[in-house]
Amino acid sequence: MVVPAREDGFTEVFLGQNSWYSIRLNASMIPKIKYIAAYQVAPVSAITHIAEIKNIEQYEDSNKYILYFTDPAQEIKKIPLGKIKNKAPQSPRYSSKEKILSASTLDSVF
């Protein structure tokens, strides 16, 4: 799964709290989600970190979820926007760890 992250939330939550929250997920997808990758919005405009998911819980009294990481997120080779500019995630998008780690641009992640 790839999530868009603004600088403040990325630093404070994704890196600082080893989690990501208030995410809408399809309940049928929860057992399939093993990793989360952060797409840092402009000015970075790239996927920069990935983390393994330890567990997923309902977030407060909502239909959203919080994802807890097994370990701190690992920095990866930046995966920037490609030729297709509308590929930047605006909400959580599903992909695989293999696609993310082998991609050179977002065009090949989704």
Image (cartoon, rainbow, N blue to C red):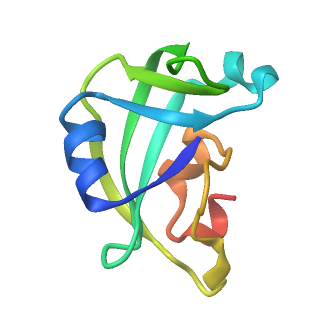
Q: In the drawing, does residue 7 fall left or right of residue 5?
A: left
Q: Position of residue 81 (x, y in %)?
A: 51, 77
Instruction: Write the residue at 69% across / 58% down.
Output: 110
Report the front residue among 77 and 72. Answer: 72
| 41 versus 62 height, above or below | below
| 47 versus 33 height, above or below | below
The quadrant where residue 34 appears: top right
Q: In the drawing, does residue 37 fall left or right of residue 97?
A: left
Q: How many marks?
A: 0
Instruction: Write the residue at 62% across / 58% down.
Output: 109
The quadrant where residue 95 appears: top right
Q: In the drawing, does residue 107 fall left or right of residue 102?
A: right
Q: Position of residue 76 (x, y in %)?
A: 32, 51
Q: Position of residue 68 (x, y in %)?
A: 40, 20
| 83 versus 30 height, above or below | below
| 67 versus 103 height, above or below | above
